[in-house]
Image (tube, rainbow, N blue to C red):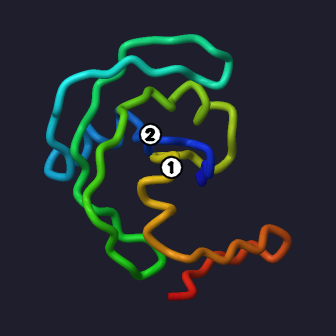
């Protein structure tokens, strides 16, 4: 999932546990969700992900339990991609045609 307003990328805790080689713990931070609730969140350095054929640089990410959401949707989410990844490329997203591409 893309979140153009997110200041950090959120990674599903279950995904991070299944792929520990991609993450290094760097402590915790206080986060605020879309409802305004605040909570302490584990933070990690994430190896740059590979999306649409491009490898992005490493970023700091928050670990979040996305399993409650995943139980209510057809296509599970392992990551909510925030600005630290989004600003690294020019994206084309065509929702009606279900197309995503990079232009550079």
Q: Nearer the viewer, residue 76 or 81?
A: 81
> Circle 1: is it few (<14), some (14-19), or many (20+) Cα within 10 Å?
some
**Rendered position, 37 above or below 63:** above
**Mark sitting earlier along the chain (2/1):** 2
In percent of width and height, residue 56 lies at: 33, 69
In percent of width and height, residue 95 lies at: 79, 68
Label 2 SS:
strand
**Disc 1: which residue:** 82
Position of 54 with respect to 68 (left or right) is left
Q: Name the residue located 62 percent from the left edge and 45 percent from the top edge.
A: 5
Position of 50 with respect to 99 (left or right) is left
Label 1 SS:
loop
Residues under numbered marks 2 and 1 in contact, where contact means CB atoms less than 8 Å apart: yes
Q: Quadrant of residue 98?
A: bottom right
State the residue lying farthest toward the right. 96
Q: Which mark is residue 10?
A: 2
In percent of width and height, residue 88 lies at: 43, 69
**Rendered position, 49 above or below 84:** below
Q: Nearer the viewer, residue 81 or 19?
A: 81
Q: CA distance from mark 2 to mark 1?
A: 7 Å
Labels 2, 1: front one: 1
**Rendered position, 100 above or below 39:** below
């Amino acid at each position: 999932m893309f979140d153009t307003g997110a200041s950090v990328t959120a990674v599903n805790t279950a995904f991070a546990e299944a792929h520990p080689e991609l993450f290094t713990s760097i402590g915790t931070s206080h986060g605020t969700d879309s409802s305004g609730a605040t909570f302490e969140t584990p933070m990690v350095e994430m190896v740059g992900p590979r999306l649409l054929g491009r490898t992005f640089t490493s970023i700091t990410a928050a670990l979040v339990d996305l399993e409650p959401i995943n139980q209510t949707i057809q296509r599970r989410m392992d990551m909510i991609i925030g600005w630290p990844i989004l600003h690294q490329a020019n994206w084309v997203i065509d929702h009606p045609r279900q197309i995503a591409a990079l232009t550079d």
